Amino acid sequence: MSTEYPHAAAFDDCPERRVSTTMSIVETDKLLTSPFMNIMGSELRKDIVVTCPKYPDSKILMPDEVFPYVPKHDQAAFVLGCKSCEFAKPTNPDTELVQQLHPAIIESSGQLFIARHYPEAAVNGHKTVKERLRDLTGYEGSSEAIGKGGLYFPDAIAENVDGMHQQAMANLLRSIDNFRNEFSHTSSRDLVEKVTHGVAYSHLNIASLAMRHLDTAVVQPKS
């Protein structure tokens, strides 16, 4: 057992959780040659289903092959909310870091970050912000969203610094535009080398800050 996850047995021995498997036919764009082939374009996939009677609304359905670098118990504990359960507390410190992020960033990037897919986690964080801009204004670009879309941020610390706050938000969103463009023009090899744990988490914090302000942003009617 990896020393990084010393309490894996606690989750495995938890009397509350229930683990089962289910088989499902999923569409795929790859031509598969395996005994699980169903028809061309589809495959039979085994999923691990983890549920907990203590938290009946919580359930995780995990393809058996995903996130090979993270023990299954830690993924399940992350999704089921076992952090507060006496039987299973996630021991990966990244789980605690992820919980500090905006909920939308947790959803889009949390498990990727825990699984150490750092460039993908950062890219998904950028994408989440852009999607929110589009939902609010119809524009993904920060300049268009603020200029043409009339996006306004009413949550300045004080009324007399509202202008500074609007400029700060414009700069923040513009930086996410530029980071996303930078990532899209960088080779996968360079991204893996340069986007380390700390760099990825910094990007997720930037995206989280943007999302927190976008939660209260309004679209002003055009004059």
Image (cartoon, rainbow, N blue to C red):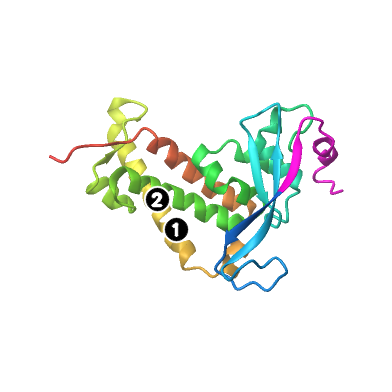
Q: Which badge, 2 or 1, is on the more N-terminal residue?
A: 2
Is the C-beta separation of discs 2 and 1 under 8 Å?
Answer: yes
Relative depth, front residue between 42 and 160:
42
In this picture, residue 22 sits left or right of residue 205:
right
Q: Residues within 10 Å of mark 1 (few under 14, many from 20)?
A: some
Q: Which mark is residue 66?
A: none
* The C terminus: image quadrant: top left
User: Tag 1: residue type?
Assistant: Arg
Tell me if residue 13 is in the magenta stretch: yes
**C-alpha distance separating marks 2 and 1:** 10 Å
Q: Residue at x 27, y 52 (%)?
A: 144
Q: Residue at x 48, y 45 (%)?
A: 206
Residue 221, image x, y percentages: 18, 38
Q: Residues within 10 Å of mark 2 (few under 14, many from 20)?
A: many
Residue 119, image x, y percentages: 57, 58
Looking at the image, residue 204 lies above or below residue 159: below
Where disc 2 sits, the SS reads helix
Q: Is residue 195 visible?
A: no
Q: Residue furthest left?
A: 223
Q: How many marks?
A: 2
User: Tag 2: residue type?
Assistant: Lys
In this picture, residue 12 sits left or right of residue 195:
right
Q: Residue at x 62, y 47 (%)?
A: 111
- Please state which of the two labelled residues, at mark 2 or mark 1, is closer to the viewer: 2
Residue 71, image x, y percentages: 76, 48
- Quarter where residue 107 is shown: top right
In the image, which residues are magenta? 1-21
User: Which residue is identified by label 1?
Assistant: 180
User: Which residue is identified by label 2?
Assistant: 130
Looking at the image, residue 190 lies above or below residue 79: below
- Quarter where residue 137 is shown: top left
